[in-house]
Image (tube, rainbow, N blue to C red):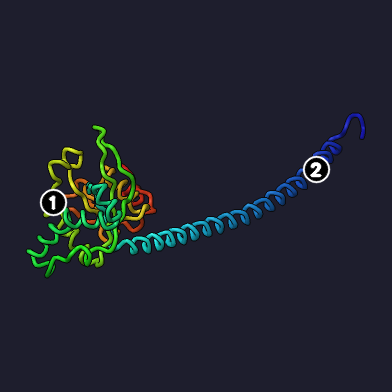
Amino acid sequence: MAANPTNLDICAMIKAMESKMDSSFGALQATIAGLQTRMDVKDTEVRAIKKDHEDLHKEVMFLQNELNNIKQAERGCNLRVFGLSVAADEVAAVGDSKAIMKKAYETILKPILTAAKANGAIATVPQVNSLLTSAHPAGKPTRDKQGRTLPSPCIIKFQSPEVRNVVLKYKRAHMPNPTDAERAGGIRKYLLAEDLTKPTHDMFKKLIEDDRTSTVWTISGSLRYTRAGDEKKTVHRVDSPFMPVNSILGAPA
C-alpha cells in the first residue's frame, strides 16, 4: 500500500474492516445462540430436576405420614400416665406391669370410670384385669426445682379403645387429686394423655409453645388447635406433624 493512501485506499480499508467485523459479529451471534440453546436445555433439565425433587419430597412426606399413622394406630389403646408413684416393694413383689396397672386402676381409673358409670356412659366399672392388658415405665424419674424425685411417666394399655376414650372424656371433670403425702413429695396432680408418636408429640409441644395458638389437643393422635384471639374458637386440624410450624399457622406477624 502507498505511503500516502488515497481516498479509495481508505474506503477499501474501511470496507475490509467492516467485512471482518461483520464476520466476527456473525460468529459471535452464532456462539451466543449456541450458548442460549445450551442454557435453555440446562434450564429445562433444572426444571425437571426441581419437579422430580418436589415429587420425591411429596412422596417422602406421604410415606412419613403413613408410617406415623400406622404407629399412632398401634397406640390406640394406650394412655400415658404422669404423677403415678408406684411403691418399690410392690414392683419387687409382682413386677412393673402388674404394679403399675393396679396403682393406676385404684388411684385414677376406677374413680373416673365410676363417674362415667353414674352418667350412663358405661354399664359397669370393669375390674383391672379386664380393663388393662399391660403397663410399663416410659422414661426415668426426674427431679423438680426443690430436688424432689418425681415418678417416671407410665404407659398403660387398655383392652378396649372405647373404654380408653371414655376415660379421656371424663378425666377433666373427675380426675382424682394426689394425696397430701404425694403433694409433699412434689406430685401436684395426675395427668392422663394420649400416647403420641415422637413426631406428633414434638409438633404438639411446638404448637403449645407458640403464641399464635390458644388451645392444642389431640383426638386419636390427630392434632387440633384453636388460634389465639379467635373469639369463635374455630377448630383447626394439622394435616401432618412433619410440616413446618409456619406452614401450619402462617408466617408470624
Instruction: Evaluate if marks 2 and 1 touch, with contact meaning CB atoms under 8 Å apart.
Output: no
Which residue shows up at 53% across the image and 55% down it?
Answer: 50
Front in this rendered view, residue 215 or 126: 126
Q: CA distance from mark 2 to mark 1?
A: 104 Å
The 10 Å Cα crowd at callout 1, few under 14, some 14 to 19, many 20 or more, is: some
SS of the residue under disc 2:
helix
In the picture of the structure, the residue carrying the numbered disc 2 is 15
Which quadrant of the view contains residue 10? Answer: top right
Q: Position of residue 151 (x, y in %)?
A: 26, 44
Q: Earlier in the sequence, mark 2 or mark 1?
A: 2
Which residue shows up at 16% across the image and 53% down it?
Answer: 107
Q: Amino acid at mark 2?
A: Lys
Q: Quadrant of the N terminus?
A: top right
- 9 vs 118, left or right, is right
In the picture of the structure, the residue carrying the numbered disc 1 is 176
Front in this rendered view, residue 81 or 47: 81
Which residue shows up at 30% across the image and 50% down it?
Answer: 204
- 48 vs 99, left or right, is right
Is 211 placed above or below 176 here?
above
Q: Quadrant of the C terminus?
A: top left
